[in-house]
Image (cartoon, grey):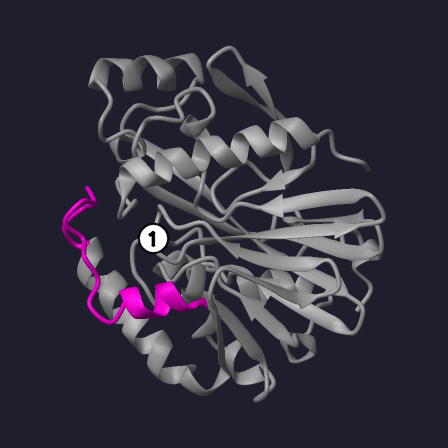
Amino acid sequence: MSLDTASHPGGPGPNELVPSRYALRVGEIDVLVISDGVLPLPAKTMATNADPAALAAWLDDMILPRETFDWPLNVLVVRSGSRTILVDSGVGVEYPGFPRAGQLALRLAGAGVDPASVTDVILTHLHMDHVGGLFGDGVKDRLRPDVRIHVAAAEIAFWAAPDFSRTVMPPSIPPVLRSVAKRFLSEYASQLRPFDQEYEVAPGVAVRRTGGHTPGHSVVSLASGGDRLTFLGDAVFPVGFDHPDWHNGFEHDPEEAARVRIRLLKEAAATGEPLVAAHLSFPFGRVAVAGDAFRWVPAYWDY
Protein backbone atom coordinates (compact mmCIF):
# COMPACT_ATOMS: atom_id res chain seq x y z
CA MET A 1 0.00 0.00 0.00
CA SER A 2 1.33 3.43 -0.91
CA LEU A 3 -0.69 6.07 0.89
CA ASP A 4 1.29 9.03 -0.42
CA THR A 5 -0.12 8.37 -3.89
CA ALA A 6 -3.44 6.85 -2.91
CA SER A 7 -5.36 10.11 -3.20
CA HIS A 8 -5.07 10.22 -6.98
CA PRO A 9 -4.55 6.88 -8.73
CA GLY A 10 -7.03 6.55 -11.57
CA GLY A 11 -10.42 8.15 -11.13
CA PRO A 12 -13.51 7.73 -9.00
CA GLY A 13 -15.94 4.91 -9.64
CA PRO A 14 -19.01 5.38 -11.84
CA ASN A 15 -21.23 6.43 -8.90
CA GLU A 16 -18.64 8.68 -7.26
CA LEU A 17 -18.47 12.39 -7.99
CA VAL A 18 -15.20 12.74 -6.06
CA PRO A 19 -12.63 10.22 -4.78
CA SER A 20 -13.44 11.07 -1.13
CA ARG A 21 -9.93 10.32 0.06
CA TYR A 22 -7.01 12.56 0.86
CA ALA A 23 -3.41 11.56 1.60
CA LEU A 24 -0.90 13.43 3.73
CA ARG A 25 2.23 12.69 5.70
CA VAL A 26 3.04 13.23 9.36
CA GLY A 27 6.81 12.92 9.41
CA GLU A 28 7.43 9.29 8.43
CA ILE A 29 3.79 8.27 8.97
CA ASP A 30 1.47 7.97 5.97
CA VAL A 31 -2.12 9.07 6.59
CA LEU A 32 -5.16 8.62 4.39
CA VAL A 33 -8.37 10.43 5.36
CA ILE A 34 -11.39 8.62 3.94
CA SER A 35 -15.00 9.81 3.88
CA ASP A 36 -17.55 7.13 4.75
CA GLY A 37 -20.27 9.51 3.54
CA VAL A 38 -22.70 11.70 5.47
CA LEU A 39 -25.34 11.09 8.13
CA PRO A 40 -28.50 13.23 7.94
CA LEU A 41 -29.62 13.86 11.52
CA PRO A 42 -31.85 16.42 13.24
CA ALA A 43 -29.89 19.65 13.64
CA LYS A 44 -31.18 20.07 17.21
CA THR A 45 -29.12 17.06 18.33
CA MET A 46 -26.00 19.26 18.01
CA ALA A 47 -27.10 21.64 20.75
CA THR A 48 -29.54 20.07 23.17
CA ASN A 49 -28.89 22.62 25.95
CA ALA A 50 -28.96 25.68 23.69
CA ASP A 51 -31.78 28.14 23.16
CA PRO A 52 -33.44 26.98 19.91
CA ALA A 53 -33.26 30.53 18.61
CA ALA A 54 -29.50 30.59 19.22
CA LEU A 55 -29.05 27.32 17.34
CA ALA A 56 -31.23 28.60 14.50
CA ALA A 57 -29.12 31.75 14.33
CA TRP A 58 -25.90 29.69 14.18
CA LEU A 59 -27.30 27.53 11.38
CA ASP A 60 -28.46 30.61 9.48
CA ASP A 61 -25.05 32.22 9.92
CA MET A 62 -23.39 29.08 8.53
CA ILE A 63 -25.92 28.95 5.64
CA LEU A 64 -27.15 25.56 6.78
CA PRO A 65 -30.69 24.17 6.91
CA ARG A 66 -32.41 24.47 10.27
CA GLU A 67 -34.04 21.06 10.42
CA THR A 68 -31.50 18.48 9.23
CA PHE A 69 -27.73 18.64 9.34
CA ASP A 70 -25.56 16.36 7.20
CA TRP A 71 -22.85 15.14 9.56
CA PRO A 72 -19.67 14.19 7.72
CA LEU A 73 -18.32 10.75 8.61
CA ASN A 74 -14.55 10.31 8.37
CA VAL A 75 -12.12 7.50 9.12
CA LEU A 76 -8.33 7.17 8.83
CA VAL A 77 -5.93 4.64 7.41
CA VAL A 78 -2.48 5.09 8.97
CA ARG A 79 0.76 3.37 8.05
CA SER A 80 3.65 3.49 10.52
CA GLY A 81 6.55 1.09 10.19
CA SER A 82 5.15 -2.36 9.51
CA ARG A 83 1.69 -1.56 10.87
CA THR A 84 -1.34 -0.50 8.82
CA ILE A 85 -4.04 0.88 11.10
CA LEU A 86 -7.70 1.61 10.44
CA VAL A 87 -9.06 4.28 12.80
CA ASP A 88 -12.84 3.85 13.15
CA SER A 89 -14.85 2.16 10.42
CA GLY A 90 -17.93 4.22 9.62
CA VAL A 91 -21.54 3.12 9.85
CA GLY A 92 -21.64 0.13 7.54
CA VAL A 93 -24.44 -0.77 5.16
CA GLU A 94 -26.76 -2.84 7.37
CA TYR A 95 -28.68 -0.03 9.02
CA PRO A 96 -31.56 1.83 7.32
CA GLY A 97 -31.82 5.59 7.24
CA PHE A 98 -28.27 6.39 6.11
CA PRO A 99 -28.28 5.85 2.33
CA ARG A 100 -25.35 8.22 1.74
CA ALA A 101 -23.04 6.63 4.32
CA GLY A 102 -21.51 3.18 4.67
CA GLN A 103 -19.01 3.76 1.87
CA LEU A 104 -15.91 2.33 3.59
CA ALA A 105 -15.45 -0.82 1.48
CA LEU A 106 -16.03 1.08 -1.76
CA ARG A 107 -13.61 3.84 -0.85
CA LEU A 108 -10.91 1.55 0.50
CA ALA A 109 -11.04 -0.25 -2.82
CA GLY A 110 -10.89 3.04 -4.70
CA ALA A 111 -7.80 4.02 -2.73
CA GLY A 112 -6.11 0.68 -3.36
CA VAL A 113 -6.24 -0.34 0.29
CA ASP A 114 -6.88 -4.05 0.82
CA PRO A 115 -8.55 -4.73 4.20
CA ALA A 116 -6.31 -7.80 4.43
CA SER A 117 -3.35 -5.43 4.81
CA VAL A 118 -4.81 -3.90 8.00
CA THR A 119 -2.87 -5.11 11.05
CA ASP A 120 -4.69 -3.01 13.65
CA VAL A 121 -8.00 -1.24 14.16
CA ILE A 122 -8.42 1.60 16.67
CA LEU A 123 -11.98 2.40 17.69
CA THR A 124 -12.55 5.75 19.36
CA HIS A 125 -15.76 4.34 20.87
CA LEU A 126 -18.45 1.79 20.10
CA HIS A 127 -21.27 3.88 18.63
CA MET A 128 -22.65 2.31 15.46
CA ASP A 129 -21.21 4.96 13.12
CA HIS A 130 -17.73 4.00 14.30
CA VAL A 131 -17.94 0.18 14.37
CA GLY A 132 -20.64 -0.65 11.81
CA GLY A 133 -18.21 -0.76 8.91
CA LEU A 134 -16.54 -3.83 10.42
CA PHE A 135 -19.65 -5.92 9.77
CA GLY A 136 -20.14 -5.50 6.05
CA ASP A 137 -19.04 -7.62 3.11
CA GLY A 138 -15.84 -6.34 1.58
CA VAL A 139 -14.36 -5.54 5.00
CA LYS A 140 -15.19 -8.21 7.59
CA ASP A 141 -14.66 -11.12 5.22
CA ARG A 142 -11.26 -9.73 4.19
CA LEU A 143 -9.80 -8.71 7.54
CA ARG A 144 -6.98 -10.95 8.70
CA PRO A 145 -7.96 -13.28 11.56
CA ASP A 146 -5.19 -11.91 13.77
CA VAL A 147 -6.14 -8.24 13.34
CA ARG A 148 -5.76 -6.39 16.65
CA ILE A 149 -8.66 -4.14 17.67
CA HIS A 150 -7.77 -1.51 20.26
CA VAL A 151 -10.60 -0.19 22.46
CA ALA A 152 -10.48 1.42 25.89
CA ALA A 153 -11.33 -1.06 28.64
CA ALA A 154 -13.77 1.50 30.09
CA GLU A 155 -15.66 1.49 26.79
CA ILE A 156 -16.01 -2.27 26.76
CA ALA A 157 -17.24 -2.24 30.37
CA PHE A 158 -19.75 0.54 29.67
CA TRP A 159 -21.54 -1.35 26.90
CA ALA A 160 -22.21 -4.32 29.16
CA ALA A 161 -25.04 -2.18 30.64
CA PRO A 162 -25.07 1.20 28.84
CA ASP A 163 -26.71 4.22 30.47
CA PHE A 164 -28.56 6.56 28.07
CA SER A 165 -30.21 8.65 30.79
CA ARG A 166 -28.29 11.83 29.92
CA THR A 167 -28.42 11.54 26.16
CA VAL A 168 -31.01 13.29 23.97
CA MET A 169 -31.26 11.08 20.89
CA PRO A 170 -34.11 10.21 18.54
CA PRO A 171 -35.93 7.42 20.41
CA SER A 172 -35.16 4.80 17.77
CA ILE A 173 -31.40 5.19 18.19
CA PRO A 174 -30.52 3.78 21.68
CA PRO A 175 -31.83 0.25 21.00
CA VAL A 176 -29.79 0.11 17.80
CA LEU A 177 -26.66 1.38 19.56
CA ARG A 178 -27.07 -1.29 22.23
CA SER A 179 -27.50 -4.11 19.72
CA VAL A 180 -24.61 -2.96 17.51
CA ALA A 181 -22.17 -2.70 20.45
CA LYS A 182 -23.29 -6.09 21.78
CA ARG A 183 -22.84 -7.67 18.37
CA PHE A 184 -19.42 -6.12 17.91
CA LEU A 185 -18.18 -7.28 21.31
CA SER A 186 -19.41 -10.79 20.56
CA GLU A 187 -18.11 -11.14 17.01
CA TYR A 188 -14.71 -9.56 17.64
CA ALA A 189 -14.09 -10.73 21.23
CA SER A 190 -10.94 -12.68 20.38
CA GLN A 191 -9.33 -9.76 18.52
CA LEU A 192 -9.90 -7.11 21.23
CA ARG A 193 -6.85 -5.49 22.80
CA PRO A 194 -8.21 -3.32 25.67
CA PHE A 195 -6.09 -0.52 27.11
CA ASP A 196 -6.55 1.58 30.24
CA GLN A 197 -5.50 5.20 29.59
CA GLU A 198 -2.99 5.33 26.73
CA TYR A 199 -1.36 2.84 24.41
CA GLU A 200 1.18 3.09 21.57
CA VAL A 201 -0.19 0.99 18.73
CA ALA A 202 2.73 1.62 16.36
CA PRO A 203 5.73 3.99 16.28
CA GLY A 204 4.30 7.49 16.72
CA VAL A 205 0.68 6.28 16.84
CA ALA A 206 -0.91 6.51 20.29
CA VAL A 207 -4.52 6.15 21.43
CA ARG A 208 -5.58 8.01 24.58
CA ARG A 209 -8.81 7.71 26.55
CA THR A 210 -10.60 11.02 27.15
CA GLY A 211 -14.07 9.93 28.29
CA GLY A 212 -16.94 12.38 28.04
CA HIS A 213 -18.76 11.44 24.87
CA THR A 214 -18.75 7.87 26.18
CA PRO A 215 -16.81 6.62 29.22
CA GLY A 216 -14.13 5.06 27.04
CA HIS A 217 -14.11 7.61 24.22
CA SER A 218 -10.56 8.01 22.93
CA VAL A 219 -8.52 10.14 20.55
CA VAL A 220 -5.61 9.11 18.35
CA SER A 221 -2.39 11.14 18.23
CA LEU A 222 0.21 10.86 15.48
CA ALA A 223 3.70 12.29 15.97
CA SER A 224 6.79 11.88 13.79
CA GLY A 225 9.72 14.09 12.83
CA GLY A 226 8.29 17.10 14.63
CA ASP A 227 4.93 16.81 12.85
CA ARG A 228 1.64 16.02 14.57
CA LEU A 229 -1.96 15.16 13.74
CA THR A 230 -4.85 14.22 16.02
CA PHE A 231 -8.01 12.28 15.24
CA LEU A 232 -10.63 13.54 17.70
CA GLY A 233 -13.34 10.96 17.17
CA ASP A 234 -16.56 12.50 18.51
CA ALA A 235 -14.92 14.93 20.93
CA VAL A 236 -15.94 17.87 18.74
CA PHE A 237 -18.74 18.55 16.26
CA PRO A 238 -19.07 21.45 13.78
CA VAL A 239 -20.92 23.67 16.26
CA GLY A 240 -18.37 22.94 19.00
CA PHE A 241 -15.88 25.59 17.93
CA ASP A 242 -18.20 28.57 18.26
CA HIS A 243 -20.08 27.01 21.17
CA PRO A 244 -17.93 24.40 22.93
CA ASP A 245 -20.33 24.37 25.89
CA TRP A 246 -23.29 23.22 23.79
CA HIS A 247 -24.15 19.58 24.40
CA ASN A 248 -24.49 16.98 21.70
CA GLY A 249 -27.43 14.64 22.08
CA PHE A 250 -25.20 11.57 21.70
CA GLU A 251 -22.97 12.48 24.65
CA HIS A 252 -23.41 10.13 27.59
CA ASP A 253 -21.83 12.66 30.00
CA PRO A 254 -22.42 16.05 28.34
CA GLU A 255 -20.75 18.20 31.01
CA GLU A 256 -17.58 16.10 30.95
CA ALA A 257 -17.71 16.01 27.15
CA ALA A 258 -17.69 19.82 27.08
CA ARG A 259 -14.67 19.92 29.42
CA VAL A 260 -12.85 17.38 27.26
CA ARG A 261 -13.71 19.32 24.10
CA ILE A 262 -12.37 22.60 25.45
CA ARG A 263 -9.17 20.97 26.71
CA LEU A 264 -8.48 19.24 23.40
CA LEU A 265 -9.21 22.35 21.34
CA LYS A 266 -6.88 24.42 23.52
CA GLU A 267 -4.15 21.82 23.03
CA ALA A 268 -4.63 21.78 19.26
CA ALA A 269 -4.72 25.57 19.03
CA ALA A 270 -1.41 25.73 20.91
CA THR A 271 0.32 23.26 18.58
CA GLY A 272 -1.32 24.33 15.31
CA GLU A 273 -1.50 20.68 14.28
CA PRO A 274 -3.96 19.30 11.72
CA LEU A 275 -7.15 17.83 13.13
CA VAL A 276 -9.46 15.18 11.77
CA ALA A 277 -12.67 14.19 13.51
CA ALA A 278 -15.44 11.81 12.63
CA HIS A 279 -17.99 14.56 12.00
CA LEU A 280 -15.93 17.56 10.89
CA SER A 281 -15.61 18.73 7.30
CA PHE A 282 -13.49 16.52 5.04
CA PRO A 283 -10.54 16.11 4.94
CA PHE A 284 -8.94 18.04 7.85
CA GLY A 285 -8.36 21.47 9.36
CA ARG A 286 -6.87 23.35 12.27
CA VAL A 287 -8.25 25.26 15.22
CA ALA A 288 -7.53 28.77 16.47
CA VAL A 289 -8.61 30.56 19.63
CA ALA A 290 -11.33 33.16 19.03
CA GLY A 291 -12.00 35.10 22.23
CA ASP A 292 -13.72 32.75 24.66
CA ALA A 293 -14.35 30.17 21.95
CA PHE A 294 -12.56 28.74 18.93
CA ARG A 295 -12.43 28.98 15.14
CA TRP A 296 -12.24 26.06 12.70
CA VAL A 297 -9.77 26.66 9.86
CA PRO A 298 -10.40 24.20 7.01
CA ALA A 299 -7.38 22.90 5.14
CA TYR A 300 -6.34 24.19 1.76
CA TRP A 301 -6.17 21.09 -0.39
CA ASP A 302 -2.75 20.31 -1.91
CA TYR A 303 -3.59 19.22 -5.45
Tell me the magenta residue range: 152-172
Answer with left or right where residue 254 lies relative to residue 31.
left
Q: Is residue 172 above or below residue 68?
A: below
Residue beneath the point at 73% across and 44% down: 228
> At which x and y percent is residue 153?
40, 69
Q: Main secondary structure of the magenta part?
A: loop
Q: Is residue 242 above or below residue 16?
A: above
Q: Is residue 133 above or below residue 211?
A: below
Quarter of the figure with the N terminus: bottom right
Task: Report the front residue among 104 and 166.
Answer: 166
Magenta region includes residue 162 = yes
The residue where tag 1 is placed is 214
Residue 78 sits in which quadrant? bottom right
Q: In the rendered image, is residue 290 in sight?
A: yes
Residue 247 sits in which quadrant? top left
> At which x and y percent is residue 283?
63, 41
Quarter of the figure with the C terminus: top right
Q: How many marks?
A: 1
Q: In the rendered image, is residue 237 in sight?
A: no
Element under label 1?
loop
Q: Is residue 242 above or below residue 93?
A: above
